[in-house]
Amino acid sequence: MSMGDEEQAGARVIVRGRVQGVFFRAKTKRTAVRLGLSGWVMNRADGALEAVFEGSRRAVEEAIEWCREGPAAAGVQSVEVTWQDPAGEGGFSVRYP
């Protein structure tokens, strides 16, 4: 199946809990790149982590599931997902507020 045959999706994810200072951004980027996703991840001023994932719906769902656990040192309390149309992000980056 070619990439064009699979539904493309986008999701904005907000992860709350112990998610800063535990390599969450770096490991989220590594996971997204492995899944072939584009988008970004950043720490928010309120202590949460925010990410946008774009790509095949299956890969986006897998990235969201990864966020529910996060890296070993993380303590995820909640994951809020908002589905959206892909905006055409190029590559996957770590953003700094």
Image (spheres, helix red, strand yellow):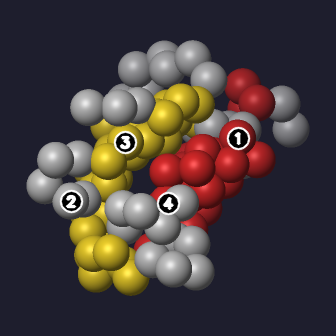
User: Looking at the picture, does residue 80 appear above or below residue 39?
Assistant: below
Residue at 57% x, 72% y is 71
Residue with the most extreme right position: 1
Q: Is residue 19 left or right of residue 48?
A: right
Q: Quadrant of the N terminus?
A: top right
Residue 96 x/y as whole percent: 35, 32
Q: Which residue is mark 1?
A: 33
Residue at mark 2: 47
72 is higher (above) or lower (below) than 80: below
Question: Residue 78, relative to residue 2: is it above or below?
Answer: below
User: Is residue 4 in sight in this rendering?
Assistant: yes
**Hey, what amino acid is under mark 1?**
Val
**Residue that label 3 marks:** 42
Residues under labels 4 and 2: Cα distance? 12 Å
Amino acid type indicated by mark 2? Gly
Q: Which mark is residue 13?
A: none
